Amino acid sequence: MGKVIAVSNQKGGVGKTTTCINLAASLAILGKDVLLIDFDPQGNATSGLGLVPKECQRSIYQALIGNVTIKEQLYPTVIKRLKLVPANIDLTGAEVELVDSSSREVRLRNSVNEIKSEFDYIFIDCPPSLGLLTVNSLVASDSILIPLQCEYYAMEGMSQLLVTINLIRENFNPEMVIEGILPTMFDVRNNISRQVIEEVKMHLQEYVFNTIIPRNVRLCEAPSFGKPVFLYDRTSKGTISYLQLAKELIQKNQAGG
């Protein structure tokens, strides 16, 4: 069975979607079968892999509300072993439509379970909030990966996210673990970047990835071309960092971490 990893942080602008796209692409390049589920109505992971969200006739919304199976929503991407389930603005209606459903928190899990055995890794790009969509993502996942921006307000909201994780464990998904905390947007010239990493290691050392994602122009530019950074500039620091993260994740899971 594949491993389902939610990439989540209720704070926006922390590199969540960038991590989803480039970690998923790096694992696929390394020979893994990977699925990326865009679960954010903004559809940034969808456009970052070359699709136009509003033109996608199939999306995660249809699978979530029960019209079709998730397998029917798969799209190929520019990387052979990476598949995508896109999202678009239709997804904003899902929270309203599901609010009275008795099984509203497990809709995504039920869909993901249909295809879990077909992939080595399934990533869920969560919206920057702690609403019903994010709850669905966490209930469906084996673990959560938390991108943490190396800037002043980085720790803001982390405690609330950890509370939410514990609530999900207690009520819906007792087996979910923290896959890791990923420092992103690290600027070697900035003392704040180093201070953030020191602080998070002081409190959550066992969860922090060794890999640190730098602030990198190529990472910012690649989405506008609808490509993972590896296909945009394979020699960039961003490319090298996400390949290193993919290798670290593989080693961690092979070791049973």
Image (tube, helix red, strand yellow):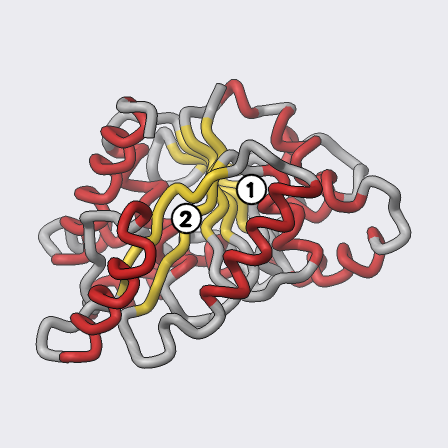
Amino acid tagged 2:
Leu
Q: What residue is shown with label 1?
A: 85
Q: Residue at x 70, y 56 (%)?
A: 132
Q: Quick check: 123 left or right of 133?
A: left
Graded by Cα atoms within 10 Å as few (under 14), some (14 to 19) or many (20 or more), the crowding at tag 1 reads: many
Q: Residue at x 25, y 34 (%)?
A: 29
Give whichever of 212, 242 is nearer the camera. Answer: 212
Between disc 2 and disc 1, whose residue precedes? 1
Q: Residue at x 65, y 45 (%)?
A: 60
Q: Quick check: 235 left or right of 13?
A: left
- Tag in front: 2 or 1: 2
Q: Is residue 144 above or below residue 223?
A: above
Q: Quick check: 103 left or right of 122?
A: right
Give whichever of 5, 34 is nearer the camera. Answer: 5
**The disc label shown at residue 177, or none:** none
Amino acid tagged 1:
Val
Give whichever of 166, 41 is nearer the camera. Answer: 166
Residue 3, x across and y down, in percent: 46, 29
Q: Residue at x 56, y 42 (%)?
A: 85
Q: Is residue 154 above or below residue 131?
A: below
Q: What residue is shown with label 2?
A: 145
Q: Residue 160 lies in what quarter of the image? A: bottom right
Q: Is residue 79 above or below residue 163?
A: above
Mark 2: which secondary structure? strand
Residue 86, x across and y down, in percent: 56, 48
- How far is disc 2 from disc 1 in space, using C-alphas? 19 Å
Q: How many marks?
A: 2
Residue 74, x across and y down, in percent: 56, 35
Mark 1: which secondary structure? strand
Give whichever of 74, 213 is nearer the camera. Answer: 213
